[in-house]
Image (tube, rainbow, N blue to C red):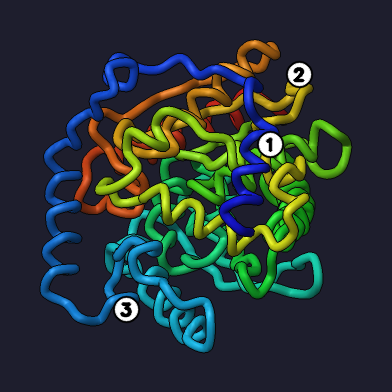
Amino acid sequence: MTESSRHGARMQYAGVMRVSAEPETAQGIPARPNFYSRILLGWIRWQGARSKAGPSQKFQPVAKTLRDEGAERAEFLAVLRKAMDTPSFPTRLSALGIRKVLTISVPGATGPMQARLYLPYGRVRGAVLYLHGGGFVHCGLNSHHGMCCRLARVSGAAVLLPDYRLAPEHPYPAAADDSQAALRWLAGASARFWGGKVAVAGDSAGGNLAAVLAQDGAAGEGPVPALQLLYYPSLYGAQVFPSHDLYAEGYFLSRASMQWYGDQYIAREEDWVAPRFVPGLNPNLSGLTPAVIVTAECDPMRDEGVAYAQALRQAGVPVQYKCYRGAVHGFLNFYALMPQGKAALRFGGRALRKAFASEGP
């Protein structure tokens, strides 16, 4: 998508929604990252200064490393994906707190896809489809392994992490279609083994997919989840929010990277306004499943979560919203070093446990 066409898409959103800003945003002054976020950001800057590897450097902002859309694209994507699917904590240690981790094959929209199933100790009640972030372009079963272990342990539910197809090789709606196929499979498995209830969860791009599945369910186009758990979700496509500008550069995820990710996932200009890409613009949110929305204060996408929480509440949907002070986008991936990451996973896991305990047999 060219800059001019992207600008045209944004103009279509003008006047759709005004987002109430936090005090720092209202004054045009960004909040200061917390201690752990400052360490992370300093480490990224240090690594970028000492390394000539460019795109091979783990956690290097995408938009700063990709300048060529030509012959080097495939090599760049391979290197990026290898780096970004690395766990932040040893996988064997992550799995110590749960009973079993199974690598399985589940149905995708066009064929089987690999997935991991996390089973906690004790009675398993309910099942969670967890959809990983990564801008629809990278991350996978390794990068989100520890997060799913913790969610399974705290929630007491089975957690399924599918390896859905990635862009740009598989543009919109491939990820959404694969996620829906996985949810249908999981709903069947939950009906047989875990009480029948399912929930959807995800971070960043995965939060987008989870919100889409919740709307699909309300429209009768898929299973109806008991809860939608959205961590710093991307929900509004090309619509611009104050936090996009306030935290545009220097806070792990940049606004330029956001634009690049969107360009990889959206191959056709008309899909920038497709309902299954911009769930935040759904004019009818009534009847959706309850939501838990978690954002990071120093994140360009923070206001998208704020806006969706407001819109859901206005539509009569029960919402729990929590913003972690001084946190940056992706802080869940660094839960091993960031106490707020652990806290956010506990917060979501307890909400899932409560949702499963209050419904069904």
Give the residue at mark 2. Answer: 286
Q: Secondary structure at mark 3?
A: helix
Nearest to the observer: residue 33 or residue 343: 33
Residue 43 percent coordinates (x, y): 14, 59
User: Vertically, is 88 above or below 14?
Assistant: below
Residue 264 percent coordinates (x, y): 59, 64
Q: Residue at the spot x=30%, y=47% of the render?
A: 249
Q: Residue at the spot x=33%, y=22% of the render?
A: 25
Residue 356 figure quarter = top right
1 vs 2, front mark? 1
User: Vertically, is 107 above or below 209?
Assistant: below
Residue 244 percent coordinates (x, y): 42, 37
Disc 3 packing (10 Å; few <14; some 14–19; many ≥20): many
Q: Which mark is residue 279?
A: 1
Measure the C-alpha gap from mark 3 to mark 2: 44 Å
Q: Is residue 333 left or right of residue 340?
A: right
Give the residue at mark 3. Answer: 56
Q: Quadrant of the C terminus?
A: top right
Measure the C-alpha gap from mark 3 to mark 1: 33 Å
Q: Quadrant of the N terminus?
A: bottom right
Tell me which label, 3 or 1, sits earlier in the chain.
3
Type of amino acid at the residue the image marks with label 1: Pro
Type of amino acid at the residue the image marks with label 3: Ser
Q: Is residue 323 left or right of residue 357?
A: left
Type of amino acid at the residue the image marks with label 2: Ser
Q: Secondary structure at mark 1?
A: helix
